[in-house]
Image: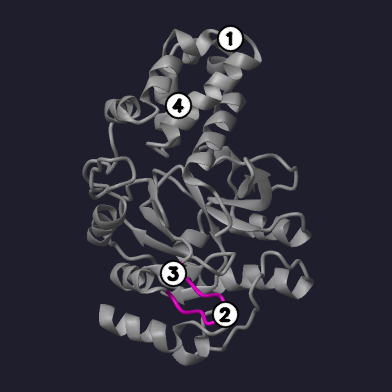
Amino acid sequence: MAGQIRQDLAANAVSADGWFSRAAHGGTGMTCGEGMMRDRSPSRAEALPGAVRENFPPDMLALRRYVVWRYEERVGKSAKIPYVADGTGARASSTDPATWRGFDAAARVFLVGGYDGVGFVFSPGDPYAGVDLDDCRDPESAALEAWASELVATLEGYAEVSPSGTGVHIVVCGAAPNRHNGRVEAYSSGRYFTVTGRAIFGHGMPPPERQEGLNMLAQKYLSGATGTHSIARSRRGEPGRLGDMEVDDLCRGARNGEEYVYLVGRGGIAGNGEGSLEAERALARLIASHTQDAAQVGRLMDRSLLGQRPEWRERVDHRTRTIEFAIAEAIGERCK
């Protein structure tokens, strides 16, 4: 089966313009040039909702898990910042269900303008896992690098082209390790993925259960993310991520471990006002470099002296913003 998928990918699964060619599978072809998200002409903007409705897994389309996003500069990089799909301009959070909406609402807000795309949030209560393969696709020829083609064939899930045209997103069912290493990321919670509908494989089909494939990916590509790694298990078993104390050990043993120990202790509260705020950001960044689980970053922050400050414990918006920015920096939310 995997061999046949590789042949399909190489032969005609993706057209040269980057869209899935339905004509090769008995459907009607779709065409849309590269750089769709950057071009806000009416025809290109209108193409996204239709492509997503046609190709994205229908069971996921029915969920209230969507945000809109736009490119913004963060720490010298272009990041995809999520917003609530209600037209208010409020920031969305991948860990706050109150900021998520249905796909139809997200599509309407996107079509009004002011945003570059729509995203799906992976939630702990859902069975889905998202795999992000970065810088693996030639936007001119639509060819995938061999390692990426191998992963698409192995996972056999819903796969689509990323907004930039140079990456691929894959969705399956299973527990991902919530990790990022180089050009590969895999998440089951605490993260949103951009959605384009530019299908490569699995168009219009429910994501299959692929726990063994996720375990293989974690072992082969993500084991070096923090120096140690726990292979993800099924959602029916233990979650595939490191415990709080294991992450704490990694932080202490890292090259910047002395800074971590300093910030966790009295060094973090040595300053006042902006000094303490900067120390919070620095500590959150150090923790997020070893775990991109927002709840886990928050728990480890809570155990520090900085975490006892009223500003941290009582201002939920401040906590959420600090953690999200730290994770964004750690995983390098760049244009994919």
State the residue in front, 177 or 315: 177
Q: Is residue 115 above or below residue 227?
A: below
Q: Which residues are magenta?
A: 136-144
- Tell me which corner region of the image, top left, top right, bottom left or bottom right, holds residue 110: bottom right
Marks 3 and 2, the one that precedes in the sequence:
2
Residue 277, horizontal then vertical, whole percent: 60, 19
- Tell me which corner region of the image, top left, top right, bottom left or bottom right, holds residue 125: top left
Tell me the residue that label 4 is attached to: 298
Marks 2 and 1, the one that precedes in the sequence:
2
Q: CA distance from mark 4 to mark 1?
A: 21 Å
Q: Are marks 3 and 2 in contact (CB under 8 Å)?
A: no
Under circle 2, the secondary element is loop
Tell me the residue that label 2 is attached to: 140
Q: CA distance from mark 4 to mark 3?
A: 32 Å
Is 174 on the left-hand or right-hand side of 69?
Answer: left
Is 66 on the left-hand or right-hand side of 286?
Answer: right
Marks 1 and 3, the one that precedes in the sequence:
3
Three-letter code, disc 3: Ala
Name the disc covering residue 159, or none.
Answer: 3
Dot 3, how many residues are within 10 Å of its Cα: few (below 14), some (14-19), or many (20+)? many
Q: Is residue 205 above or below residue 327?
A: below
Marks 4 and 2, the one that precedes in the sequence:
2
Marks 4 and 1, the one that precedes in the sequence:
1
Q: CA distance from mark 4 to mark 2?
A: 42 Å
Tell me, yes or no, if residue 55 can be seen here.
yes
- Tell me which corner region of the image, top left, top right, bottom left or bottom right, holds residue 184: bottom left
Three-letter code, disc 2: Glu
Looking at the rendered image, the disc whose residue lies closer to the viewer, 4 or 2, is: 2
Q: CA distance from mark 1 to mark 3?
A: 48 Å
